[in-house]
Image: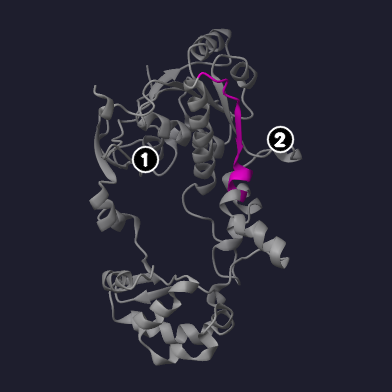
Amino acid sequence: MSMPDRLPLERFTIVEVNDRDVPLCLRLATSLAGKIAADLGATVLKVEPPSGDPVRHAPPLLPQGGSALFQFLNTSKRSLVLDLATDVGRAALDKLLDTADAVLFEEPASIAAMARATHATAIEIAAFPVEMQAAHRPVSEFTILALGGLLHMVGEPDRKPLRLGGHQASYAAGLTAFTGLAGALAARDAGRTAPSVRVSLAEAVQWVNWKAASGAAASGASPGREGKRSEFQIVPCRDGHVAIVYTVTQWQATRGLIGDPRLGDPRFATRAGRRQHVAELYDILRPWFTDKTRHEIQALAQARGVPFGPVFSPAELLDSEQYVARGFFADIAHPTLGKLRLPQLPVQWNGRSFAPKPAPDLPT
């Protein structure tokens, strides 16, 4: 293989340990960090309990059987079954770690002490910072989202908060763990000692929702659900909905795009004024969208440098112009499930994408 064709992490071996009793939110974070490394070329050995990673049965499920979530999170990995409750299983894991570059694992985990004492650099994913008394209590992604303030951001203010779709907390922590993993591998590659890494979901969510802390520090209150008082809103158009978003410097371009002379009212000249009179402002803005399609609105807005965004369903994203042009979705042939369409990593290396390989079946 020539140098331009080599994958960036193909010289590294990483062990991913999915302990059988850890919460799902931690398991997903570990799997995402391992997935990114595997798709980038690393040899990722996924250690599963004898019954398999529980995510193998987690929704959403594929029509042909099995978990779509598992297939997405475990591309390009190899699976190894070890019973870590036995001396034989722990001894086999210990042998693996003696030759690996890094080990990804969750806290609490029965292999934590073993992982920190081996040749491999320890990358630990936990629910909370070590300073929190709640560190060893039961946890779910829902409680992490609530503690981080993200549930305070979604939904109408006079109704209960809406749970975010997907797994934002787990994926944010998984991406953070991969960042720490990449730093550790770079240190090892340079002949330096790589320090261990510990990532907590609670801290990752605080970082994602940084406006909560900064808003509280600046005004005494964290930003939350404003509904019809929000500066940026979702409005209906001819074939769906569009998000109205613009920066302070894009207000003049937004005025020109809408073309209604009432937007020149001095009340709307500043951001403070627009927020104060947001109901009157949207009474002027909404009618412009009603007779136009999402595609027409996006084209007109982009021509003026205004970042209005169409709202797509998951099915529509498969045919999104941007994703098609980038080749973002890859069709892969799974040995038992047939053809699967999965997202690729949203980066390229020497002009090519990182095509994932199928997630492994459970060894027998």
- Image quadrant in which the N terminus is located: top left
Query: Which residue is identified by label 1?
Result: 68
Query: Which residue is identified by label 2?
Result: 130
In the drawing, does residue 102 fall left or right of residue 198?
A: left
In magenta segment, residue 200: yes
The kind of residue tagged 2 is: Val
- Can you say whether 213 is above or below 342 in the image? below
Could you say which is closer to the camera, residue 191 or residue 89?
191
Percent of width and height locating residue 229 = 56, 77
The magenta segment: 191-206
Could you say which is closer to the camera, residue 182 or residue 122?
182
- Can you say whether 347 is above or below 360 in the image? below
Percent of width and height locating residue 193 = 57, 20
Q: Distance between the residues labelled 2 and 1?
A: 33 Å
Percent of width and height locating residue 289 = 34, 79
Which residue shows up at 51% across the image and 85% down it? 268
Which residue shows up at 28% across the image and 45% down it? 329
Could you say which is closer to the camera, residue 286 or residue 245?
245
